[in-house]
Amino acid sequence: MNARVLSGRPVAAAIQSQLSADIDELLRQGKKRQLLIVAATDDPSSASYVRTLQRFGGQTGVTVTVADLGPDASEIDIRTVLETASADENVHGIILQTPLPDGASISGLGSAIAVEKDVDGANPASLTRLLAGEACFAPATAAAVVELLDHYEVGLAGRPISVVGRSLVVGKPLLHLLLNRDATVTVAHSRTADLAAATGTAAVVVAAAGRAGLIRAAHVAQGSVVIDVGTNFDDAGALVGDVEAGSVGAVAAALSPVPGGVGAVTTALLFRNTVYGLPDPSGSPSLPAAAGAVL
Ligand SMILES: NC(=O)c1ccc[n+]([C@@H]2O[C@H](COP(=O)([O-])OP(=O)(O)OC[C@H]3O[C@@H](n4cnc5c(N)ncnc54)[C@H](OP(=O)(O)O)[C@@H]3O)[C@@H](O)[C@H]2O)c1
């Protein structure tokens, strides 16, 4: 593979080190920061991600609390916990884990998370704000793609960028984050007739389809930058992205790995959003504004 590897690890480490310093200062002032994770599932990958968040919180000085309601929780139970936490001044960020019990939906329950604590952009009101260009938290994975591109100084303004996937958690918010940065964006999806035509001339391709090996050399332009958001498991149980790294890496100039790419940055952004909150509309934030928060 000739492509430069756009690792998310140094990006996450830089965010974590800034956070640790600022948290130390906040703790000296007697101010704690707390992230609440609400889970209503026994899915092992959710449990594993919760452990990742707990570890990051422990290393950073952010209190991570888990409200584990179990897979049989009712929608009302979950909503009550989200509403109580939204009103609790000791909680600064709230994440609702998926999958949810049958009958409950992230779009339905997301509205119970106060917009200023909605660090993963689950409340439809956060997406509305994103579309309007108002202060909000975008879904952290979408924001992590932009953070990764910015870290490696990949230009966005005026450039053709192709996003593969149109979900509410990745593709659609990423479209708007990129539009807000003056990129010219194409969004492909499962009904796109000619995927290679939609991606093959883009300066940047973002793969977020959840299909292992979907993006191959024929889908990307020589010298392009490819960001792999996908998380899939191959037949041997190994975590792989949507991009066939071997063939694409021979054509692209740069490629983000899976694991160790977008996912690492996503975790760091959830904490950055929790620690700094939304930008102060008065324009005088006491701490740096969080990425993923859009003005
Ligand atoms: N690294 C992280 O932090 C992180 C976070 C979230 C998600 N992810 C991963 O990112 C991937 C996408 O997640 P998601 O929640 O957005 O998934 P999703 O809700 O299943 O959406 C997948 C999108 O990809 C499109 N798609 C599926 N097959 C396609 C194909 N053959 N050609 C073109 N487009 C295709 C779908 O099109 P239609 O709309 O037409 O169905 C849909 O818009 C998954 O692998 C997920 O695990 C990673």
Image: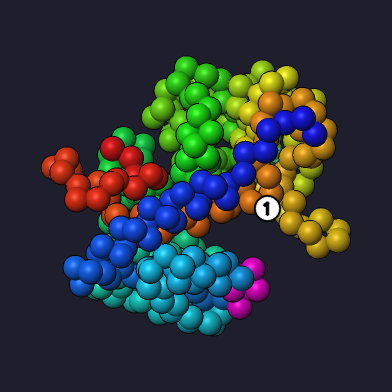
Disc 1 target residue? 259
177 within the magenta span: no
Q: Quadrant of residue 119?
A: bottom left
Residue at point 57% right, 50% down?
Answer: 9
Front residue of this view, candidates 233 and 198: 233
Across and down, in percent, residue 259 comes to 67, 52
Across and down, in percent, residue 241 comes to 71, 47
Front residue of this view, candidates 18 and 267: 18
Residue at point 79% right, 59% down?
Answer: 238
Q: Quadrant of residue 242?
A: top right
Residue 104's place in the image compared with 185, above or below, is: below
Task: Name, please, the residue furthest toward the right.
Answer: 235
Asked whether residue 119 is in view, the answer is no
Quadrant where the C terminus is found in the figure = top left
- For the magenta stretch, what is the residue range? 42-47
Is the residue indicated by label 1 positioned so its CB lies within 8 Å of ligand 1?
no
Across and down, in percent, residue 108 comes to 42, 61
Front residue of this view, candidates 202 and 263: 263
| Circle 1 crowding by C-alpha within 10 Å: few under 14, some 14–19, many from 20 | some
Badge 1 amino acid: Pro
- Give SS at disc 1: loop
46 within the magenta span: yes
Q: Quadrant of residue 91?
A: bottom left
Task: Name, please, the residue furthest toward the left.
Answer: 282
**What predominant SS class does the magenta segment belong to?**
helix
Quadrant where the N terminus is found in the figure = top right
Across and down, in percent, residue 155 comes to 50, 24
Front residue of this view, candidates 144 and 101: 144
Residue at point 37% right, 68% down?
Answer: 62
Left or right, 56 with respect to 273, comes to right
